[in-house]
Amino acid sequence: MLNVVVPTSDMAVVVVGVGAVGLSAIMALKLLEHPPKKIIAVDIVGSRLELARTFGATHGVNSKVRPDLMKVLMDITRGRGVDGAIDTTGKPDVITALIHSAARKGKVVTVGVGDVSSSSPSLFEGYPKPHLPTIHYQISR
């Protein structure tokens, strides 16, 4: 994941789904020599968000309380968008929100298992072509 996002100290990186894989990503981000200035954890379970904070997340977003992920991320980044996004849910609506929340030249990585094929044509709907983020799907068995 981090080899694709290539985080630097001036970046904002979001991790959606802070179970075992998401928490590992947050720990890895925090352990970098120059960790991103903003590490945003998103989950529907409050206790996971608290744990994410103890492992290095600078922001915690409960998506049950604040369901408009794109708006929340744009607010946190003051309209710039996130430079890196790591999705562990595999949910097409989450991936779409991350794509539309990406900064220019932002990178979106999904390691979750989900059915993206059914919504793939609409993922980029309304997104200007010169601003499309880099998207990577990592499939492991």
Image (cartoon, helix red, strand yellow):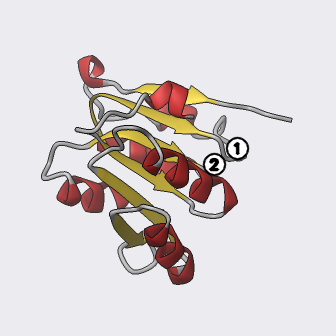
Mark 1 and mark 2 lie on one chain; the one further toward the N terminus is 2
User: Does the CB distance between marks 1 and 2 fall below 8 Å?
Assistant: yes
Residue 18 seen by the camera: yes
Where disc 2 sits, the SS reads loop
Image label count: 2
Measured in 3D between alpha carbons, the distance from the residue under mark 1 to the one under mark 2, in whole angstroms, is 7 Å
Residue 117 quadrant: top right
The percent coordinates of residue 99 (x first, y second) are 39, 39
Q: Secondary structure at mark 1?
A: loop
Whether residue 59 sits left or right of residue 53 in the image: it is: left
In the image, which disc is placed on residue 90? 2
Relative vertical location of residue 92 with respect to residue 17 in this rendering, above or below: above
Residue 78 falls left or right of residue 49? left
Which residue is painted at 33% across and 63% down in the image?
A: 58
Query: Disc 2 residue type?
Result: Gly
For image coordinates 14% across by 48% down, the residue present is: 79
Front tag of 1 and 2: 2
Q: Residue furthest right?
A: 141
Identify residue type, mark 1: Asp
Residues 103 and 11: in front is 11
Crowd tier of the residue under label 2, counting other residues whose Cα lies within 10 Å: few below 14, some 14–19, many 20 or above: some
Picture coordinates of residue 23 (x, y %)?
58, 59
Q: Residue 3: x, y in percent? A: 53, 26
- Tell me, for residue 65, which label it has, or none: none
Instruction: Give the residue displayed 25% in from the left and 17% down from the top.
Output: 130
Instruction: Specify the label residue 115 is tagged with.
Output: 1
Depth check, front residue: 14 or 58: 58
List the single residue furthest toward the front. Answer: 33
